[in-house]
Amino acid sequence: MMILGMKISKFYTPKKTISTILYFKPYLCPKAQTAMKQIFSPGSEMSYEKIISRDDIAAFESGVVHEVYATFAIARDAEWAGRLFVLEMIEPDEEGIGTFVQVDHHAPALVGETVVYEAVIDELHRNVVGCTFAAYVGKRLIASGRTGQKILKKDKLQALMQNLTSP
């Protein structure tokens, strides 16, 4: 299956205990009602491939730190791995929004290398979708962690965003 030009496939990954490095928690309505499609269950798996580009290296306003795949780029791509489930689950009047990203960065990866992200649903209730992920270059584990998303009605999400910007 292809989604936005990324190869999606089934995979198997061993279970692993993971500690928190990055954590983001937006202010969201915890009782949002959704009609999301119940097409996955805990244990459902997806993967996609990502080729590391210069846009993905560890660089800040002060310049390039080193020319390897940055932890913040891994966090972005890990969130995408979990979002692949959400894209198939949402109804036309719904949208997913990230609630957290947890990353353990185990090993470097270089520009031009292909990273395979493997995601497994480990939490699925009401409008919450949680996934573990592992990212590999070949057999080398470069990162692992967990991501979370909530599925909300688009009008509820729009109202939440307007409340953030209203005086």
Image: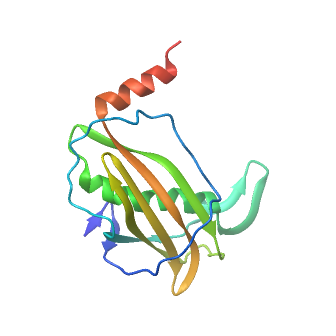
**Nearer the observer, 69 or 79:** 79
Outermost residue to the top: 167
Outermost residue to the right: 62
**Nearer the observer, 76 or 5:** 76
Quarter residue 124 falls in: bottom left
**Nearer the observer, 62 or 148:** 148
Image height of 142 relative to 63, above or below = below
Quarter residue 131 falls in: bottom left
Q: Is residue 163 left or right of residue 6?
A: right
Image height of 79 relative to 105, above or below = above
- At 25% across and 53% down in the image, what residue appears? 89
Q: Is residue 151 left or right of residue 163?
A: left
Quarter residue 41 falls in: bottom left
Q: Position of residue 127 (x, y in %)?
A: 32, 45
- At 62% across and 60% down in the image, what residue appears? 20
Tell me which colouring the rendered structure shows. rainbow
Quarter of the rendering occupied by the N terminus = bottom left
Q: Position of residue 136 (x, y in %)?
A: 52, 78
**Nearer the observer, 106 or 17:** 17
